[in-house]
Image (spheres, rainbow, N blue to C red):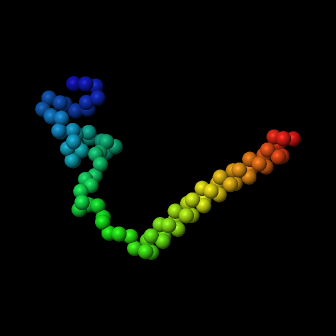
Amino acid sequence: MNNYNHQNSENNTENDVFKSDNSYRGNEFFQLPADMNEESVPTEPYTKKELRVIALNATLAALAVAAVFIIGAALFILFCIHVWFK
């Protein structure tokens, strides 16, 4: 048994590690990902209203990031003019 094995491996096989109930670890932090079969994945397309909301939110996020960079550049220029170059 190596140091990384957290279970008694006398009666377990390697396939027991990938049990779907994740009971081999005893810790919720180490759970395996959910089953992503076709029945559990939504396949409905977005409506026009949902697409507009997604596009608006993406545009606003990009503008917020751009504003942070522009404000940072303006503050750097002010710092250079009033502090660094005096």
Residue 47 falls in which quadrant of the image? bottom left
Query: Residue 40: x and y, percent?
Result: 26, 60
Q: Residue furthest left?
A: 11
Q: Is residue 34 above or below residue 7?
A: below
Residue 5 in the figure: left or right of residue 52: left
Query: Residue 13: x and y, percent?
Result: 15, 34
Residue 72 in the figure: left or right of residue 56: right
- Quarter in which the C terminus is drawn: top right
Q: Residue at x 57, y 59 (%)?
A: 62
- Quarter in which the N terminus is drawn: top left
Q: Residue at x 55, y 60 (%)?
A: 61
Number of numbered labels in the structure image: 0
Residue 64 in the figure: left or right of residue 14: right
Query: Residue 10: x and y, percent?
Result: 14, 29
Query: Residue 4: x and y, percent?
Result: 29, 29
Residue 8 in the figure: left or right of residue 73: left
Q: Residue at x 25, y 24 (%)?
A: 2
Q: Residue furthest right?
A: 86
Q: Residue at x 48, y 70 (%)?
A: 53
